[in-house]
Image (cartoon, rainbow, N blue to C red):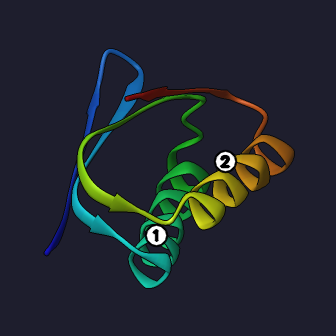
Amino acid sequence: MFKTEIEFSKNILYVKIRGNANHKNLIELKRKLYYILNEYGIMDIMIDVKEVVSLDKITFYDILDDYDIKFGGNLNVIE
């Protein structure tokens, strides 16, 4: 099971990921995040992956690299 919780508070977008973060799930999360970022111009993101059971690291870090290129904001990963 894959679950995400996305919350905006104090100018920071908090993203909590739980479960199996496979390629398909991460691409869907990327689509949602990019929509939010483009719509609201948020620059600070915290991604919490402490409750991830299985992480497709290649896809995850490709998304982080792509984010840095497209948005260049402040992104922190909590492991």
- Looking at the image, is mark 1 or mark 2 earlier in the sequence? 1
Q: Disc number at residue 64?
A: 2
Q: Answer with left or right where residue 60 lies relative to residue 14.
A: right
Q: Answer with left or right where residue 34 lies relative to residue 15.
A: right
Point out the residue furthest to the top here. Answer: 10
Amino acid type, mark 1: Leu
Q: Badge 1: few (under 14), some or many (20 or more) residues near its Cα, within 10 Å?
A: many
Q: Badge 2: few (under 14), some or many (20 or more) residues near its Cα, within 10 Å?
A: some
- Dividing the picture into quadrants, the one containing residue 7 is top left
Q: Which residue is drawn at 48% across and 58% down?
A: 33
Q: Disc number at residue 26?
A: 1
Q: Which residue is drawn at 66% across and 52% down?
A: 61
Residue 25 at x, y = what percent?
A: 38, 77
Residue 50 at x, y = what percent?
A: 26, 36
Amino acid type, mark 2: Leu
Residue 17 at x, y = what percent?
A: 27, 51
Q: In this view, does 10 lie above or below 48?
A: above
- Dividing the picture into quadrants, the one containing residue 3 is bottom left
State the residue in front, 60 or 31: 60
Q: Is residue 73 above or below residue 40?
A: above
Q: In which quarter of the image is the C terminus?
A: top left
